[in-house]
Image (spheres, rainbow, N blue to C red):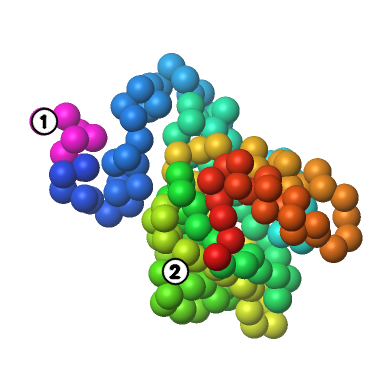
């Protein structure tokens, strides 16, 4: 039995989000090694959500996107659903209140949560200190949506435009 097939059948730990990826997206020739240091990466402000792209689909052969968020208390995202991507949240510093599928909890440094595609989820930084959170998306591609959102004019967001952009990437607010 091939390793990916074994992991898919066994449902082993963090490999679960990879089980839906097509084998051809995992070919090593589409990827090159890369080191990203602590303060490195492409920085974007996405409607107040401060993101640093660490790895994109272009760099991982479509396999995953890894984004670091550094946000102040109160910053959050409304309840939404990704139809095409699974998402993993890993809190590095601070506190994140997260709701996935109707269950709300607080994640502290070292805690991790999995939001499968198709399941409504939301998050908000809580507490008295900023939060540093790594977001992983499987498969990659959602970084293109964030780039479009970051290019919108500053000020209060035009939610009709935001909804239209997100809809093109099969992300909808609920």
Say whether residue 106 is left or right of residue 165: left
Q: Nearer the viewer, mark 1 or mark 2?
A: 2
For the N terminus, the image quarter is top left
Q: Secondary structure at mark 2?
A: strand
Residue located at (30% from left, 46% from top): 15
The disc at residue 118 is none
Magenta highlight on residue 99: no
Pinpoint residue 52: horizontal percent, then vertical percent.
68, 48
Q: Which of the 4 image quarters holds residue 115?
A: bottom left
In the image, taking residue 20 as reference, residue 122 lies left or right, namely: right
Q: Percent position (x, y) of residue 85?
A: 46, 46
Q: Which residue is mark 1?
A: 1
- Left/right placement of residue 18 relative to residue 104 reads left
| 125 up-or-down from 138: above or below | below
Circle 2 Cα neighbour tier, 10 Å, few/some/many (<14 / 14–19 / ≥20): some
Q: Is residue 146 visible?
A: no
Residue 14: % across, % down: 33, 51
Q: Which corner quadrant holds the C terminus? A: bottom right
Q: Residue at x 57, y 42 (%)?
A: 169
Q: Residue furthest top?
A: 29
Q: Residue at x 42, y 61 (%)?
A: 119
Camera sees residue 75: yes
Q: Earlier in the sequence, mark 1 or mark 2?
A: 1
Is residue 162 or residue 14 the one in the foreground? 162
Q: Is residue 133 above or below residue 42?
A: below
Per the rendered image, the range of residues in magenta is 1-7
- Above/below status of 45 relative to 124: above
Disc 2: which residue: 100
Magenta span: predominant SS is: helix
- Give the number of callouts: 2
The local secondary structure at tag 1 comes to loop
Q: Residues within 10 Å of mark 1 (few under 14, many from 20)?
A: few
């Amino acid at each position: 039995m091939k390793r990916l097939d074994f992991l898919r059948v066994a449902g082993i730990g963090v490999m679960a989000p990879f089980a839906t990826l097509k084998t051809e997206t995992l070919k090593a020739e589409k990827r090159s090694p890369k080191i990203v240091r602590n303060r490195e990466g492409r920085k974007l402000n996405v409607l107040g959500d401060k993101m640093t792209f660490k790895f994109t689909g272009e760099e991982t052969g479509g396999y995953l996107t890894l984004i670091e968020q550094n946000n102040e208390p109160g910053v959050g995202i409304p309840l939404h659903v990704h139809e095409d991507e699974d998402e993993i949240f890993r809190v590095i510093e601070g506190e994140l209140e997260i709701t996935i599928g109707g269950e709300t909890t607080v994640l502290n440094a070292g805690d991790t949560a999995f939001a499968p595609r198709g399941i409504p989820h939301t998050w908000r930084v809580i507490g008295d200190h900023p939060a540093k959170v790594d977001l992983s998306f499987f498969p990659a591609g959602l970084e293109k949506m964030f780039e479009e959102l970051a290019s919108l004019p500053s000020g209060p967001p035009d939610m009709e435009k935001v909804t239209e952009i997100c809809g093109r990437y099969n992300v909808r607010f609920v």
